[in-house]
Image (tube, rainbow, N blue to C red):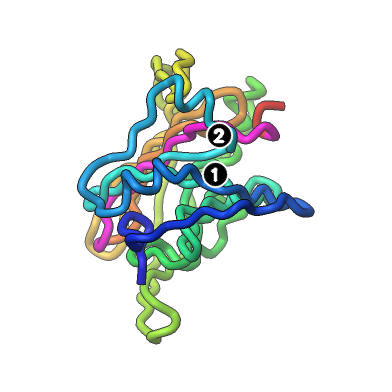
Amino acid sequence: MATLFRMGLVVTFSALLLSGCSARVKNVADTAKTALFGHQDVVLTTEQVNDYPYAAAYIKTDHFPQAVAVLDRVSDQQRVYRTGAEESITVRLGRILTSSGVPGMPLYTSNWQSDPLACHVQQQHMGTRQLCPRHWQRDVEVGNYGENDVTRQTVQSSFMVGEKQSYQHPDGTDLTVTTIIERGSVADHSFENQFYTVAGRVVYARQWVSPKIGYAIWREMKPFSGDLN
């Protein structure tokens, strides 16, 4: 099965029509060809990013190079990105919740509605003094449903707001972002996740996903227009 970062030799992105709430789009063939064998990161120039006609994100892990994922559809705060015909990742504010066709990525995340990240992002955007939850517990499933090979683990974590820092967006825009830090544990492994937030959205996220993949980095490459309102 083709994975997120190792697609087949022939990757055809035919024109896909926009329908309903879907934002499904065709990818750029040259971008796909660069990622075929998984030997190097896909990195577009600032000019290429600004000329890119679709909302998209960069995704990479500790074990696989950077690929471009195109926004497929939107549902409230959830964003579904695709890199090929079968590989997809569902993200909420930069956090990877579910996936399809991507070994090692979460298949399911419980209790995602209670993720304190959303409160912290909104708090930084609105400048309110609301008290956000500091702790979050969820179950995450990783594996393969079709082969009945699924591991379910309980993840516990706590949150804090870090310092502001400078961050250059892939489109060349210089941003001042606030770092949301999440520290936690799963089984016998401890982790630290970081989310960069600005203007009510997350533009960068480094997060632990599984022992198979390690950390994954999600970066907004071309923002969804609905996130800029």
**Residue 140 placement: quadrant:** bottom left
Percent across and percent down for residue 195 are 43, 35
Q: Is residue 64 magenta?
A: no
Q: Which secondary structure, mark 2?
A: helix
Asked if the residue at tag 2 contacts the one at tag 1, i.e. Cβ–Cβ closer than 8 Å, the answer is yes
Residue identifier under label 1: 116
Residue placed at 59% from the left, 33% from the top?
A: 53
- Write down the region rendered in magenta: 211-226
**Residue 206 placement: quadrant:** top left
Whether residue 196 can be seen here: yes
Amino acid under label 1? Pro
Residue placed at 23% from the left, 48% from the top?
A: 62
Residue identifier under label 2: 120
Residue placed at 51% from the left, 46% from the top?
A: 27
Identify which residue, 211 or 80, lies in the foreground.
Answer: 80
Q: Is residue 78 left or right of residue 6?
A: right
Percent across and percent down for residue 37 are 25, 54
Percent across and percent down for residue 216 are 34, 48
Residue placed at 58% from the left, 37% from the top?
A: 54
* Residue 208 in the image: above or below residue 187: above
Q: Which secondary structure, mark 1?
A: helix
